[in-house]
Image (cartoon, rainbow, N blue to C red):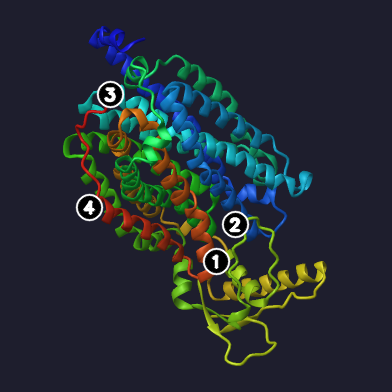
């Protein structure tokens, strides 16, 4: 349909078409987010199936694989951005949704470490890379497609529905996982039940493709196509300073904060509750489903509000709120979810006495490194227990192994250098058992006691982060679309978006967990999102223009 033909369509018919565009775009994007999020939600289970290392190493690998899917997203943005700017918006997101669905289904079929050995984690990461590559072209296409159909006065409102798709995809992922967990034993879920959410994506893929194939090309792109004014997206986006400057402003002012705020509230909070505070995974899933479901309408609300007061002030409110929340809110979460841990940390702080030269930075993305020094053994055991500690340099150098002091009780570590495999396993088990006994005696809980968990308190903290995330994310699609001209919009928008969410946000859980393991402070990883958010606040105030009401055709 040409632009002239579209102009001849009656207003009532155009309104119906716009609603169909919004519904179809949001539904398809929600499916892609569902596919992408089930991996992050099941990171702990996947770690046990795809690595042969210890629990902490396996979990770090799972977070690394989670990050790998995000790391490749800017490449997908470059590829599909050019595709969308030259071939069309509709064709681009039909290809992306197919790639995502097939890769997700294959993860559900992939044999684990026991069957394939080292090939299992390699193939898993390869499929995550395909997922990330596909998602790199999805968001930009959907947001642009809706914005180019929307009236200017409702652009924030209508693109706000696209922003809800991430929340809806996460709700879907959590709901399917929770239903699957509830229908079988924990052992069965860990062994094979975790595959069901991945395999279920095949049916969703068919439905999403059918919906999207009914759509027509956006009028703004159709106009360019009719006028034979197709761009050279890479050259115009990145070699023309005016456009490159706008790309950089979008990245630093909007997307740094977006990656930090959204993924801190939706993913790092989940890892913190489950991994550090030892809350039952099914309970964490239920809490997140509730928080995400309650906050989902806020994406549309803040999108609508940005149509009234401007994109910039609404997004800035979300950034400032998140900055004020990071450290106090995670402390509140500890007090609410595992008060016994908070009480024990105050009453019986843990110190590790060691030769500092023997303490490694345990950065192990593949989960395959072997740490043999006693400092590393003690540090890893405490990190795995979710316990903060302070390192103290040993006064006198010597062969004495590192030790941990818990409430006046000292637990010696063990040097693993030169031991056989059986001796290493026995030494690790002995140290872990002694340390656990000392922690138990000092009142450190092995798991969060359900009868002491303040569920409304935990939910309230999660909702505060959701408010910050929705205020930033709700107007974001409209703001990004309005920053760039139609000829290069898909490329110029997608690249900063996926650097921000893919690299800043996707690397957040993995990097923050590694920072905690290195520093011995369960809150130390929060410096990661805090720094990125503060950078965005300064850039937004000084550099980001207000775009509400800009023509985009």
User: How far separated are the C-alphas under marks 2 and 3?
Assistant: 43 Å
218 left or right of 74 in image: left
Q: Are marks 4 and 2 in contact (CB under 8 Å)?
A: no
Residue to which mark 4 is pinned: 541
User: How far separated are the C-alphas under marks 3 and 4?
Assistant: 28 Å
User: How far separated are the C-alphas under marks 4 and 1?
Assistant: 35 Å
Pointer 2 local density, CA inside 10 Å: few below 14, some 14–19, many at least 20: many
Q: Nearer the viewer, residue 291 or 246?
A: 246
Name the residue located 21 percent from the left edge and 32 percent from the top edge.
Answer: 550
Pointer 3 local density, CA inside 10 Å: few below 14, some 14–19, many at least 20: many
Q: Earlier in the sequence, mark 1 or mark 3?
A: 3
Q: Are marks 1 and 2 in contact (CB under 8 Å)?
A: yes
Q: Quadrant of the C terminus?
A: top left
Q: Earlier in the sequence, mark 4 or mark 2?
A: 2
Residue to which mark 2 is pinned: 60
Q: Nearer the viewer, mark 2 or mark 3?
A: 3
Q: Earlier in the sequence, mark 1 or mark 2?
A: 2
Q: Earlier in the sequence, mark 3 or mark 4?
A: 3
Q: Nearer the viewer, mark 3 or mark 4?
A: 4
Name the residue located 49 percent from the left edge and 59 percent from the top edge.
Answer: 512
Q: Nearer the viewer, residue 202 or 335?
A: 202
Name the residue located 21 percent from the left edge and 41 percent from the top edge.
Answer: 546
Choose top left, top right, bottom left or bottom right for residue 335.
bottom left
User: How far separated are the C-alphas under marks 4 and 2?
Assistant: 36 Å
Q: Position of residue 390 (x, y in %)?
A: 50, 77
Residue to which mark 3 is pinned: 150
Q: Quadrant of the N terminus?
A: top left
Q: Earlier in the sequence, mark 2 or mark 3?
A: 2
Residue to which mark 1 is pinned: 517
Q: Position of residue 111 (x, y in %)?
A: 73, 40
User: How far separated are the C-alphas under marks 1 and 2?
Assistant: 10 Å
Q: Which mark, by number, is residue 116?
A: none
């Amino acid at each position: 349909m040409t632009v002239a033909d579209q102009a001849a369509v009656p207003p009532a018919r155009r309104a119906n078409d716009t609603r169909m565009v919004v519904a179809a775009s949001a539904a398809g994007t929600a499916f892609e987010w569902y596919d992408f999020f089930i991996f992050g939600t099941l990171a702990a289970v996947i770690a046990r199936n795809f690595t042969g290392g210890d629990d902490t190493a396996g979990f770090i690998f799972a977070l690394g694989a989670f990050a790998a899917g995000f790391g490749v997203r800017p490449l997908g943005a470059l590829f599909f951005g050019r595709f969308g700017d030259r071939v069309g918006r509709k064709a681009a997101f039909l290809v992306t949704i197919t790639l995502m669905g097939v890769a997700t289904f294959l993860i559900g079929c992939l044999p684990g470490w026991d069957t394939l050995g080292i090939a299992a984690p390699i193939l898993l990461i390869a499929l995550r890379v395909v997922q990330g590559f596909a998602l790199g072209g999805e968001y930009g296409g959907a947001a642009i497609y809706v914005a180019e159909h929307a009236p200017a006065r409702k652009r924030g409102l209508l693109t706000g529905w696209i922003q809800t798709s991430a929340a809806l995809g996460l709700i879907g992922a959590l709901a399917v996982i929770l239903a699957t967990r509830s229908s079988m034993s924990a052992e069965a879920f860990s062994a094979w039940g975790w595959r069901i959410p991945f395999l279920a994506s095949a049916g969703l893929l068919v439905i999403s493709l059918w919906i999207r194939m009914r759509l027509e090309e956006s009028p703004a792109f159709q106009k360019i196509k009719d006028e034979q004014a197709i761009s050279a997206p890479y050259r115009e986006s990145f070699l023309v300073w005016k456009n490159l400057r706008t790309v950089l402003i979008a990245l630093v002012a909007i997307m740094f904060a977006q990656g930090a705020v959204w993924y801190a509230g939706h993913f790092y909070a989940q890892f913190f509750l489950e991994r550090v505070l030892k809350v039952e995974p099914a309970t964490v899933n239920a809490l997140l489903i509730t928080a995400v479901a309650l906050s989902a309408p806020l994406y549309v609300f803040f999108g609508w509000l940005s149509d009234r007061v401007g994109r910039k002030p609404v997004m800035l409110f979300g950034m400032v709120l998140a900055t004020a929340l990071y450290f106090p809110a995670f402390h509140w979460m500890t007090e609410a979810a595992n008060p016994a841990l908070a009480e024990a940390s105050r009453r019986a702080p843990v110190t590790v006495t060691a030769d500092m030269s023997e303490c490694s930075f345990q950065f192990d993305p593949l989960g395959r490194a072997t740490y043999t020094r006693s400092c590393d053994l003690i540090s890893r055991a405490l990190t795995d227990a979710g316990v903060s500690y302070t390192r103290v340099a040993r006064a006198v150098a010597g062969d004495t192994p590192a030790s941990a002091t818990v409430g006046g009780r000292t637990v010696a570590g063990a040097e693993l250098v030169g031991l056989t495999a059986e001796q290493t396993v026995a030494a690790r088990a002995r140290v872990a058992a002694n340390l656990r006994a000392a922690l138990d005696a000092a009142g450190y809980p092995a798991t969060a006691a359900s009868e002491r968990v303040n569920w409304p308190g935990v939910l309230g903290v999660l909702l505060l982060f959701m408010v910050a995330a929705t205020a930033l994310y709700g107007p974001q699609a409209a703001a990004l679309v309005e920053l760039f001209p139609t000829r290069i919009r898909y490329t110029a928008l997608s690249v900063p978006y996926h650097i921000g969410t893919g690299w800043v946000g996707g690397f957040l859980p993995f990097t923050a967990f590694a920072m905690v393991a290195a520093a011995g402070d369960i809150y130390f990883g929060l410096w990661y999102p805090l720094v990125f958010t503060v950078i965005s606040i300064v850039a937004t105030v000084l550099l980001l223009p207000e775009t509400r009401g800009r023509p985009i055709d």
